[in-house]
Amino acid sequence: MSRDPFSFEGDRVLLLDQTLLPDREETIEVRDALQMADAIARLAVRGAPAIGIAAALALAVEAARDGSAATRLGRLEDAGKILVASRPTAVNLTWAVERILGAARRALARDPDLDGERLAALVREEALAIWEEDRAASRAMAAHGADLFPAASRFLTHCNTGALATGGGGTALAVLLELHRRRPGGIEVWATETRPLLQGARLTAWELREAGVPFRLIADSAAAHTILRGGIEGVLVGADRIARNGDAANKIGTLGLALAAQAAGVPFVVVAPTSTIDPAIPDGASIAVEARAAEEVTAIRGMRLAPTGIRAENPAFDVTPSRWIGAIVTERGVFRGPPYELGGPVDTKPGP
């Protein structure tokens, strides 16, 4: 299955509301950047590549509104600030916004008399290019990652890294789906429930079931046990930001999986497009970790679990040091490490 998490209709973006899955499939109509920022912040659309694309499409909607090219550019810059502030950890969001703004600024600098409609068309073309490039990246990552595991059959994955988290393809989950296509019935996946908002239980399980991949859902707290005692042969995860040295921020709980994989001698592989690599930051200490509402820990879908009035902490991400990452799979190939040096032009090491 490959399900686009959104569609673009020129003056609006329609989002599949991922907070309601798997119970209901409903769409949200987004007509401006403020609405999109809200959807991103509350995880109606989530996954680093997907929120980058969603932000780009929101800017295309903003650019389509009336006004001169200069007026539209000013509106885009204001909208970009709103979008970037909605999720601090995922670098794809900032990357996509800066790419759109850069294209618009260059166009106006080249032609100060540029028509507003032409600027809007350029922004739309750039946003759609980001989306299509992500689809192509998903296909390439799936192939590169699957080549790393010619014989392994038992895998564990964390969070949701499938079509819903991207422009319709996937990162780590795309690798597993490719392995399933190559060897139907020959692999089995253990998927963690994954906080916050149980994205593994709700979304990964849904995508694996739709694709017909044999899988089992486990509690986050059972992951280390499963890696050490369950015969797991590979742990595959995505990333929201990767530092220049290969340190990777991903959904909370990923660090524990890396430690367990290290102890068990199991390959721990990060799968992410190169747009997730942030060469401007030297290491994971520079990555901002988002803290989400305490209510996501004390309650689930409005049902209180904990005593009233207690304090709770809810970090959405953790950072895995590169020394525990065996490979980083991108659309351009496989980085093998550690150590990693991801600054400057991307130059991957070939082959599985």
Image (spheres, rainbow, N blue to C red):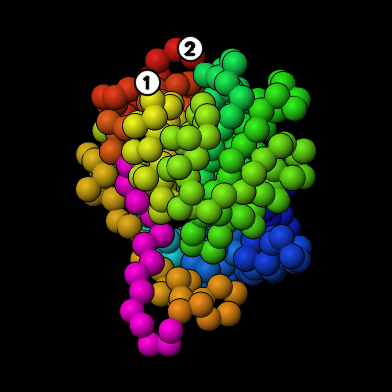
Q: Secondary structure at mark 1?
A: strand
> Which residue, given by chain and number where applicable, does mark 1 sit on?
336
For residue 155, say whether it is visible.
yes
Q: Marks 2 and 1: in contact by CB < 8 Å?
A: no
Q: Residues within 10 Å of mark 2 (few under 14, many from 20)?
A: few
Q: Residue at x 56, y 67 (%)?
A: 39
Q: Is 310 a magenta residue?
A: yes
Nearest the viewer among 179 and 70 is 179
Residue 351: which numbered mark, if any? 2
Label the magenta part by its dominant secondary structure. loop
Residue range of the region highlighted in magenta in the rendering: 307-320
Residue 16, given in percent of the width and then of the height, sits at: 69, 60
Q: Quadrant of the N terminus?
A: top right
Relative to 120, say whether 71 is above or below.
below
Residue 125: which numbered mark, if any? none
**Quarter assignment of residue 201:** bottom right
Relative to 252, say whether 41 is above or below.
below
Report the amino acid beneath label 1: Arg
